[in-house]
Image (cartoon, rainbow, N blue to C red):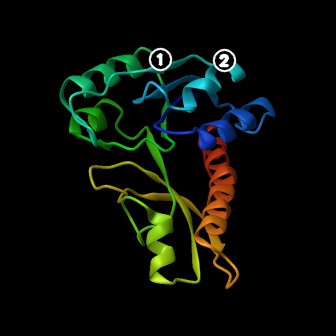
């Protein structure tokens, strides 16, 4: 299974996937390309470390969605990789119909809450402010509804009375780093 990963930030989830690949933890999955919509994103530095091509693709003209010329550039770049799976690992853009159609049924996303609770931005902060006792993370298929696609798997994280927002964030990230590679391995077979 050929996998491409899209990310906008540090790339900690992409790193967890690449580490799993190094240890045989992705089954028949193989990451063939990393992409980012930010030229300074940490995910791009992972490419040389793990021997995987990493590339910035200009997302302009929009700041929060992938549409128009930027969307076309991403579609072309990803199609050139012939992926079986497109993994959104901290990719902070809303995908539009042309992108969704180009990779229909092959896009998964990691979200930092137990969907359908706390969709959208800042899932961890939303859970923290709401005062729930359990939150976590979700891997789901991507559809036109933001964070609304079919759920593939979830991992629960208990919020302890001693937790701070920072410690909760660290716990959710640890759960993400285990869950996402495990889901990819199951999909890869």
Q: CA distance from mark 2 to mark 1?
A: 18 Å
Identify the residue at horizontal 51%, vertical 42% (top origin): 89
Of the residues tagged 2 and 1, which is closer to the observer?
2
Q: Quadrant of the N terminus?
A: top right
Identify the residue at horizontal 45%, vertical 29% (top origin): 36
In the picture, measured across the screen, residue 39 lies left or right of residue 183, that is left
Residue 157 pos. (x, y %) = 64, 71
Observer-nearest of 38 and 28: 38
Quadrant of the image occupied by residue 76: top left
Identify the residue at horizontal 25%, vertical 22% (top origin): 72
Q: Write down the residue under mark 1.
A: 81
User: SS for tag 1?
Assistant: loop
In the picture, measured across the screen, residue 158 lies left or right of residue 125, that is right
State the mark number for residue 164: none
Q: Quadrant of the C terminus?
A: top right
Q: Residues within 10 Å of mark 1 (few under 14, many from 20)?
A: few
Q: Earlier in the sequence, mark 2 or mark 1?
A: 2
Q: Is residue 105 above or below residue 50?
A: below
Q: Write down the residue under mark 2.
A: 48
User: SS for tag 2?
Assistant: helix
Residue 100 pos. (x, y %) = 30, 38
């Amino acid at each position: 299974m050929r996998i491409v990963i899209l990310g906008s930030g540090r790339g900690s989830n992409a790193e967890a996937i690449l580490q799993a690949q190094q240890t045989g933890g992705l089954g028949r999955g193989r990451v063939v390309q990393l992409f980012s919509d930010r030229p300074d994103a940490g995910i791009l530095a992972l490419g040389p470390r793990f021997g995987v091509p990493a590339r910035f693709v200009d997302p302009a003209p929009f700041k929060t969605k992938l549409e128009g010329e930027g969307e076309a550039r991403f579609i072309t770049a990803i199609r050139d990789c012939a992926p079986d799976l497109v993994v959104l690992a901290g990719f902070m853009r809303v995908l539009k119909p042309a992108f969704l159609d180009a990779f229909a049924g092959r896009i998964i996303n990691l979200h930092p809450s137990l969907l359908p609770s706390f969709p959208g931005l800042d899932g961890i902060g939303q859970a923290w402010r709401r005062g729930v006792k359990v939150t976590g993370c979700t891997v789901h298929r991507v559809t036109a509804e933001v964070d609304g696609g079919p759920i593939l798997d979830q991992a629960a994280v208990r919020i302890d009375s001693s937790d701070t927002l920072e410690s909760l964030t660290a716990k959710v990230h640890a759960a993400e780093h285990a869950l996402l590679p495990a889901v990819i391995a199951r999909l890869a077979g």
